[in-house]
Image (cartoon, rainbow, N blue to C red):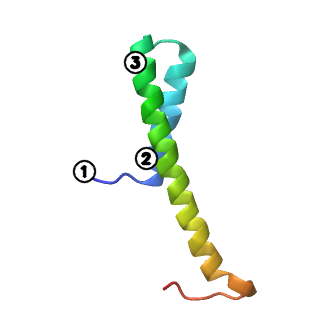
């Protein structure tokens, strides 16, 4: 399975939230959408943590450093 970009995952999460808020889903569909949304939020959170970690390495002590 191909890993989707941060932006693609974020757009999918936004769509799921829109569907859940609209009330257009059945209860079963809502549970599936909620589960997918929770998985996507964990993926997005992990990607943000990785980016933060890289940024800390780059700007450690106010100096630009090379990524390892």
- In the image, taking residue 26 as reference, residue 20 lies left or right, namely right
Q: Which mark is residue 1?
A: 1
Q: Could you say which quadrant of the image residue 59 lies in? A: bottom right
Residue farthest right in this picture: 62
Q: Position of residue 62 (x, y in %)?
A: 74, 85
Asked whether the residues under the numbered discs 2 and 1 touch, taking CB atoms below 8 Å apart as contact, a structural biologist would say no
Mark 2 vs mark 3: which is more N-terminal?
Answer: 2
**The one of 27 and 58 positioned closer to us in this rendering:** 27
Asked whether the residues under the numbered discs 2 and 3 touch, taking CB atoms below 8 Å apart as contact, a structural biologist would say no
Would you call the spot at circle 1 few (<14 residues within 10 Å), some (14-19), or many (20 or more)? few
Q: Position of residue 17 (x, y in %)?
A: 54, 28
Q: Which mark is residue 8?
A: 2
Q: Position of residue 21 (x, y in %)?
A: 57, 19
Mark 2 vs mark 1: which is more N-terminal?
Answer: 1
Relative height, residue 1 to residue 62 (above, below): above
**The one of 8 and 20 positioned closer to us in this rendering:** 20
Discs 2/1, front: 1
Mark 1 vs mark 3: which is more N-terminal?
Answer: 1
- In the image, taking residue 55 as reference, residue 39 lies left or right, namely left
Q: Residue at x 45, y 45 (%)?
A: 9
Asked whether the residues under the numbered discs 1 and 3 touch, taking CB atoms below 8 Å apart as contact, a structural biologist would say no
Discs 2/3, front: 3
Spatial CA distance of label 2 from label 1 is 14 Å
Relative height, residue 9 to residue 14 (above, below): below
Spatial CA distance of label 2 from label 3 is 21 Å
- In the image, taking residue 26 as reference, residue 53 lies left or right, namely right
Secondary structure at numbered mark 2: helix
Q: Position of residue 2 (x, y in %)?
A: 28, 53
Q: Residue at x 55, y 88 (%)?
A: 66
Q: Which residue is mark 3?
A: 29
Q: Residue at x 52, y 84 (%)?
A: 67
């Amino acid at each position: 399975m191909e890993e989707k970009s941060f932006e693609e995952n974020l757009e999918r999460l936004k769509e799921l939230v829109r569907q859940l808020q609209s009330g257009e889903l059945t209860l079963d569909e809502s549970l599936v959408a909620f589960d997918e949304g929770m998985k996507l939020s964990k993926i997005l959170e992990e990607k943000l943590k990785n980016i933060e970690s890289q940024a800390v390495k780059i700007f450690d002590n106010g100096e630009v450093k090379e990524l390892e």
